Image (cartoon, rainbow, N blue to C red):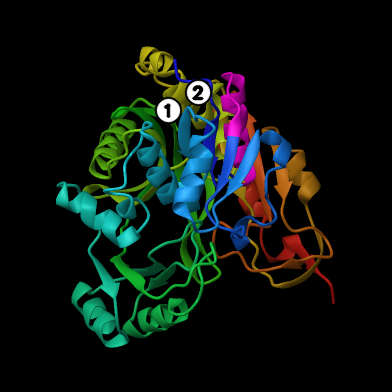
Amino acid sequence: MASQGPVVIVDPYGPVKHLAEAFHSAGYDCLRVQSTADVPPLYRSSVIPAQVFSGTIIHSGDWAATLASVAAHNPAAVVPGGEVGVEFADRLSESLGLPSNGTALSKARRDKYLMIETIKKAGLRGAQQLLVTSSEQLAAWHTRVGSRIVIKPIRSAGGDSIHFCDTQEESVKAYLSILGSRNIFGQDNDIALAQEYLPGAEYMVDTVSHDGRHYVSDMWRTTRICANDMIDLCCSLQIIPPEGEIAGQLTGYAYQVLDALGIRFGPAHVEIKLTPQGPALVEAGARVAGGSIPSVARLSTGESQHEWTARAYVRPEVFHDRRGEPYRIQRFCAIVALISPVHGTLEGYCGLERIESLESFHSMHVSVRPGEQITRTIDDLTYPVVVTLAHDVEEVVYRDMNTIRYLDGPHFYRLAS
């Protein structure tokens, strides 16, 4: 068993509170380490209350001082709480001699260009891509690709500033819009990434690892629509069983991605396109899945990536004893996002009560309330309402997902005049 010192969680914000609770249930306190003096803009409204943690250490730029402060607590483990804390957690765990993914491939676990190049060097399929340095270079490359491409920041999350471009003019315009802007973590975008567009269904595979041995805690199929000038705008997730041909392809490929990126310990969130040529990585995060995914996975299977992460770090013998047991769907679940086509001051929604009356309705999170500004949905960060569905019969969930899509649209939103 690990030392009874606390588990360090680096940059825990928002739903990561539930990860801390999983460690509490295993008998461990949690120490919060903030890798930046200021909370990134994305998380300023979702800072977890201080009482969840046994203490807080804020890194002010003096690495030796921060390391000494953390070491004084004799921590049992160091875990990233989110995307922005991955590299800091790698450095901290490696310096403390704790289970760690190490720093050799840290950058490849954050930088989207290096990530794809790293998995391709390991023999895995990945998109053609270009690290863009000029408009002329990008236009020429787009011509050589000869089809739709994707432009994105090399470091971000949540679908931030992703552009699908069919022409040279569109791709150059997207590149220039990214250049000089800031990503959702408040970091400058001084370069952009261009990739070939990968056709096919997109899946999310959530894993937990200990000493290079992996476990899939949950898998999701995404559904997507073309809306608000966006292609492949994600509008729902449905949990899928761990068995079957598709699940087998996803699991095998995800494990190879983890190995290629050096993810030997802890959680990962792997996004995969199942193209006609086989699985191809969209991107991977060496941290727990974002948003409500772990909570809905628990609703569906009885456990989540949070509980498995706690086992991997502080109950590894239990992790390995149970690693051969695939998760079991006890009830079918989906996460469905409303897609706002409007911009302005929201006066009200026209139909939330109809959604609440659906047979599989479980819960609803309203991000934009009457009187607040609503924007057109263009990424994971601009959903006005997210609905969780759960039912013993899968077809009921699918029916209700389609009903929500039918109800949603321009007439669903009433704007102040």
Please say if the residues under marks 2 and 1 sit with CB atoms less than 8 Å apart.
Answer: yes
Say if residue 9 shows up in the picture: yes
Left or right side of 290 for 15: right
Left or right side of 365 for 295: left
| Amino acid at circle 1 | Pro
Give the crowd class for mark 2: few <14, some 14-19, many >=20 residues within 10 Å.
some
Q: Main secondary structure of the magenta part?
A: helix
Q: Which image quarter holds the C terminus?
A: bottom right
Give the crowd class for mark 1: few <14, some 14-19, many >=20 residues within 10 Å.
some
Q: Residue at x 18, y 77 (%)?
A: 144
Query: Circle 2 sits in a helix, a strand or a loop, which is it?
Result: loop
* Residue 90 image point, x, y percent: 38, 44
Q: Residue at x 33, y 55 (%)?
A: 107
Q: Residue at x 54, y 63 (%)?
A: 184
| Amino acid at circle 2 | Ile
Query: Circle 1 sits in a helix, a strand or a loop, which is it?
Result: loop
**323 is higher (above) or lower (below) than 196:** above
Q: Tag on residue 329?
A: 2
Q: Which image quarter holds the N terminus?
A: top left
* Residue 21 image point, x, y percent: 62, 29
* Residue 234 image point, x, y percent: 50, 54
Q: Residue at x 52, y 34 (%)?
A: 72
Residue 21 shown in magenta: yes
Query: Marks 2 and 1, how far apart in space?
Result: 7 Å
* Residue 166 image point, x, y percent: 35, 75
**5 is higher (above) or lower (below) than 63:** above
Q: Which residue is mark 1?
A: 241
Residue 170 shown in magenta: no
- Where does the magenta region start and end? 13-30
